[in-house]
Image (spheres, rainbow, N blue to C red):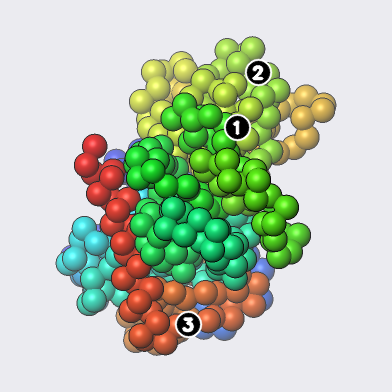
Amino acid sequence: MHDPQPRFDRPSGTGLLLRPEMELCQSALPLDWYQPEFQPYAEEFLRLPDRRPATVLAWMEPYVRPALDHFGDELLLLAHFYMGGEIVKVVEHFGGVIADSYALAVAAHKRPEKKVIVESAVHFMAESIAILAHGDQSVWITNPKAGCTMEMLAKDWMVLPVADQLQERYGDELLVVSYMNTSGRLKALSGRTGGASCTSSNAHLVVDWARRQNKRILFVPDQHLGRNTAAKLGMDLGKLVTLPDPSRGAIDLAPQWAELDRAEMILWGSACGVHTIFTPEMVRWWQERGYRVLIHPESPIEAVRAADGEGSTNYLWDAVQTAPRGSKLAIGTEGHFVNNARELGRQRGVEVVHLAQIPEPGFGSGGCGCATMSRNDPPHLVGMLDLLRKGTAPSINRVLAGDMVDERTMRRDRLHEEERKRLVAEARLSLERMIAIVEGQ
């Protein structure tokens, strides 16, 4: 049986502790942002007198515990490090797993006993889980509108026409590496071309593997991760070609063929708005004040080169967990992550600041969290679990491979069964190649 009372100050995988008096950082969403089925839960949440764990968890318990008891060991709760502070903390409080995108992708595949998987993260992450899931596992997302600005500029209808032009010119010489921040439809393109998926934690391993295939690489979608990965591997950056900004419309490669013919790796032209704000000047400002600067590789290469270290969310979190007491860290990544890292640092006697939050004129006021990722909150988690227990969960919250959901309208394009089977076969190849590359190290 589960303990019906909220418990605090107990160890967790991330090292974060819930304390009754602390403030949880995520603000509530407007009521009309919730699906109709979720609005009753949101109305209750909005009426709570505060956002402290003692209050929030006391409201969640009567909904979440019956669902945990109903599904038992067959239920798996997941969240990404970038989610708002409330979700990271409460998912872990209720026995869930907080991880980076690689660990989330393989979670269902490696735990076949988990039949119902509820993810508080973004759609491409849930879809990757669904691609690797076993046939008797179902994947649910707490908010289908949770997306990624980088992925929004690399939809299949944007990328596939460009890939067709490249394949017409280079044929089997083209290999596609698909970052985790892509839909299953693009991971399927990667699989079809003999490529592999990657995450920020293993991009260097995957690109190194791809180079050994003696192919021309198309890296989709983040140009900064692609460039930083090439630099990490010692590649000639003069042999990288960045494609035009996809937000400006259809891309005709004809003007670039001479340049593309000399390219070793072609970079799709989208980027993460949260990470593009970081500059070498910000890095040096903190370094001059005794801080060690760590940065995510989705950031511009000039800032990454100036920093003291770069890596994935797991790398950044581990750096805070293992830093000696008295350390000072400036972290360049998504704002909610840094808020949670700052709290972890306070618990450990480590000072953590956000790289872009410089208290001096001329630096702006950066440090925002990812607005689309933050569309997961306690009412969405409570509603999802309660509706699943009752057998009335909305169909659109069920994630199948190949689903495309508009992050604004929530309109879903779902493949027919035969199309989905083909996509799963191809996209799974891409993900399984990534797993084999990583676990073969």
Name the N-terminal-most of marks 3 and 1: 1
- Which residue matches tag 1? 238
Q: Element under label 1?
A: helix
- Which residue matches tag 3? 414
- Which residue matches tag 2? 284
Q: Element under label 3?
A: loop
Identify which amino acid the numbered label 3 is placed on. Answer: Arg
**Badge 2: how crowded within 10 Å, few (<14), some, or many (20+)?**
some
Identify which amino acid the numbered label 2 is placed on. Answer: Arg
When the figure is inspected, residue 287 is found, relative to residue 31, above or below; the finding is: above
State the residue at coordinates (24%, 62%).
Answer: 109
Pick the quarter of the image with the N terminus.
bottom left
Q: How far apart are marks 3 and 1 (CA)?
A: 41 Å
Q: Where is residue 187 in the image (x, y as percent from the top left)?
A: 43, 62
Mark toward the viewer: 3 or 1: 1
Identify which amino acid the numbered label 1 is placed on. Answer: Gly
Along the viewing direction, whichever of 426 and 348 lies nearer the viewer: 426
Q: How many marks overall?
A: 3
> Can residue 111 be seen in the rendering of this structure?
yes
**Badge 3: how crowded within 10 Å, few (<14), some, or many (20+)?**
some
When the figure is inspected, residue 391 is found, relative to residue 430, above or below; the finding is: below
Q: Where is residue 333 in the image (x, y as percent from the top left)?
A: 56, 39
In this picture, residue 136 sits left or right of residue 281: left
When the figure is inspected, residue 103 is found, relative to residue 316, above or below; the finding is: below
Along the viewing direction, whichever of 334 and 73 lies nearer the viewer: 334
Q: Position of residue 391 (x, y in %)?
A: 34, 86
